[in-house]
Image: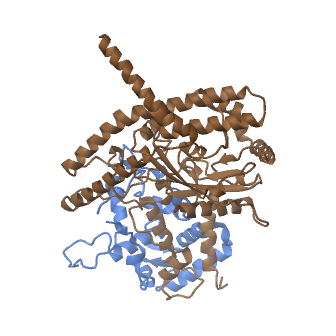
Amino acid sequence: MEDFWGLAVQLLHVWMFVVFFLIMLPAMFGLSLGVTGVYIQVLVHILEWATLRIQRGRQQQPSVPVPLPNGIIEHAGGSMEEEMGRLRSGSLAEGKFCLSDVFYFYKKGVESIVDDQVTQRFSSEELNSWNLLTRTNQNFRYISLRLTVIWGLGVFVRYSVLFPLRITLATIGLSWLVIGTILVGFLPESSVKNWLSELVHLTCYRICARGLSATIVYHNRENKPQKGGICVANHTTPIDVVILSNDGCYAMVGQIHGGLMGVLQRSMVRACPHVWFERSEMKDRHAVASRLRAHVAAKTKLPILIFPEGTCVNNTSVMMFKKGSFEIGGTIYPVTIKYDARFGDAFWNSSKYNMVSYLLRMMTSWAIVVNVWYLPPMTRQDGEDAAQFANRVKSAIAHQGGLLDLAWDGGLKRGKVKDSFKEEQQKQYSSIITVGNII
Amino acid sequence: MGFNGTSPLLDQRGELRPEDFGAIRELSMNPIGDRIISAFFSPGKETVDFASFVRILAHFHPTETSRSRDGVQPEPANSRTRKLKFAFQLYDQDRDGKISREELLQVLRTMLEMQVTEEQLQSIAERAIQEADLDQDDAISFDEFRKSLEKVDIDHKMSIRFLS
C-alpha cells in the first residue's frame, strides 16, 4: 500500500516537473521547444495516409457517402438581370413584364429551400476527407481495419494522454491569471505596473494556448495593433481571444458574467483597463459608444478588441459587420483569423453545445492550428459612412483569409429577415421591367 | 435521387408546417416566397409529409433527354409539361384552369409591391393578357400559357442539379 502511494507521489513529481520546466517556463519567455511542431508534422503525415485510404475505400464501397463541403446543389451564378435575360432569350423586347419572369424567383426560392447560404454558415464546416475524429465522420462508417485501428489509437492518445495534460495547463493558466492580476492590481499606477500586467497576461494566455495545443502563426507583425486603436477580427469561437492575446495585450469589451468568467473579468480589470459592461448598459448604444470613445481618445490605453459580427460563424465566411464599432473613430486594425479544420473544428455552435462541452471538445481534438494575419490599418475616409467603411474592412479581412464575403447579418442565427431585403429584390425587378419607359 | 441531405427542417414529427419554411432566410427575402411555400401544401391541408415534399421537389429534377417516351409509361413529374403545369399553378391559385386578370394582378403585386403604382400594375397585366390570350376570353388558359412560353428553355430554368 505504501509502495503504491510512494509511486503515485513520484509520478506526480515527474508530471509537475515536465509541466513546469518544459511548458511553463518557455511560455513565460515566449519560447517554444518545438515539440508541438513535431507533433503537427506527424499528424499531417497520418492524416494524409488516412485520406488515401478512404479514397481507396470509397472506390471499393460505393455506399460510403461523399462529403459535399460547398452545398448539395449546383447554384447558377449571375444577377437578376442576367438570369431574366436568359429566360426571355431575346423573343420579347426588353423592359416588359413577361410570364416567364416568375420562374427566376421560383427557382431561387426552391433552391433556398433545398440548400441556402445562411443556414450553412451556422453549422460546422464539412471536411473534404475524414480527419480521424469520430465527430467529423457522419455515422461512423467502417472503411478498413487499419483505419479503425489508427482511429482507436487516436482516441486513446487524445483522451488519456493529451486531455489530462491540457486540463492541467488550462487550470494553471487561468488561476495564474486571476492571482497575478490581483497582485498586480495592488500596485499604484505606473509604467512598472503596465509592464508587469502585460507580462502576467501574456504568460497566462500562452499557457492557456499550450493547454489547447495551439500552434499559431502570425503574419505581417509590423501591422500589429497599436495603443489607442481598435482591433477588429472575424469571430469563430471564444478562443479567438486567447489566440490574439498570445501576441499582444488588448483591452477587451464585453458583458460582465457571473461565475468563473465574472471572477476572471473582475480580476483582469484591476491590472489593466478593460471595458466591461453591466447587462443593462449593453442595451444603451450611446452609453457603450461613449465609453469606448473615451477609451480610444486616451492614446495610452491598450487597443480595444472587438468582433463586429456579433456572433460566432463557422470560419468559412465573414458575415455582416455591425457598424457601431466603426462609428467610434480612431484607427481600425483589421485582423484575419483562419483555423485549419483538419486538426479540430474550432467553431462554437452555441445552440448545440454549451461552453463547458465546447471546451471539452476542443481539448480532445488533435490540435488547433491557426493563421493570424495582421492587415494594414484603415481609417474612415471622407464621404464614407460607417456602414460602407464596415463593408470595406470586412472585404479586406475576407479576402486575406480566403473566406466568403457575405452580406448577411450574423444575427439571423436567431432572428428573422428584415423586410428591407424583400424590398431590395422588388426594386431590382421593377427596374428591369421599366427599362424602356414603356410603362 | 439522393434526397438524404435535403430536408434539415423535418423534425421528429416527420411533417412540415408553413412556419418551418419561415426559418429559411433567403426564402423570406424572395418576393414570391409565400406562394412557393403554399405550393408545397395541398389545398386545405396544413402539413406536408416527406413523401409529398419530395414529390413537389421532383418537379425541379433535370429532364433526362435519354428517357424514351412511349405512351405506356405515365408522364414523369419533371417533364416539360409537368414543370409548366406546376408554374401555371403558381398563378392560378383557385385551380380553375385559367389565369384570370385578378390572379395575374396578385402575382404582379407581390413581385413589385410598392415600386409601381396601381395604374402601372393594371397596364402591365392588361398587356400581358392581350399578348397571351388567343381566344379572347380575358383569361390565360394552360395551352395559351404554354404557347407563350414556347421559346423559353424550361428544362434549364426550372431544374435544380444535385451534385454527385
Question: In the displayed image of the protein, which residue is found farthest to the top?
Answer: A2
- Which residue is more in the foreground, A186 or A107? A186
Q: Residue A229: x and y, percent?
A: 73, 51
Q: Residue A93: x and y, percent?
A: 56, 88
Q: Residue A332: x and y, percent?
A: 70, 55
Q: Is residue A310 visible?
A: yes
Q: Which chain is brown?
A: A
Q: In this rendering, would B40 be left or right of A79? A: left
- Which residue is more in the foreground, A370 or B84? A370
Looking at the image, what colour scheme do you see? by chain
Q: In this rendering, would A241 be left or right of B97? A: right
Q: Is residue A416 visible?
A: no
Q: In this rendering, would A374 be left or right of B2? A: right
Q: Which chain is blue?
A: B
Q: Residue A139: x and y, percent?
A: 29, 47
Q: Residue at x 67, y 72 (%)?
A: B116
Q: Residue at x 41, y 57 (%)?
A: B41
Q: Residue at x 31, y 42 (%)?
A: A154
Q: In this rendering, would A152 be left or right of A379? A: left
| Position of B76 relative to A37 (above/below) | below
Where, by quadrant of the figure, is residue A56 drawn? bottom left
Q: Quadrant of the N terminus of chain A?
A: top left
Q: Residue at x 37, y 21 (%)?
A: A10
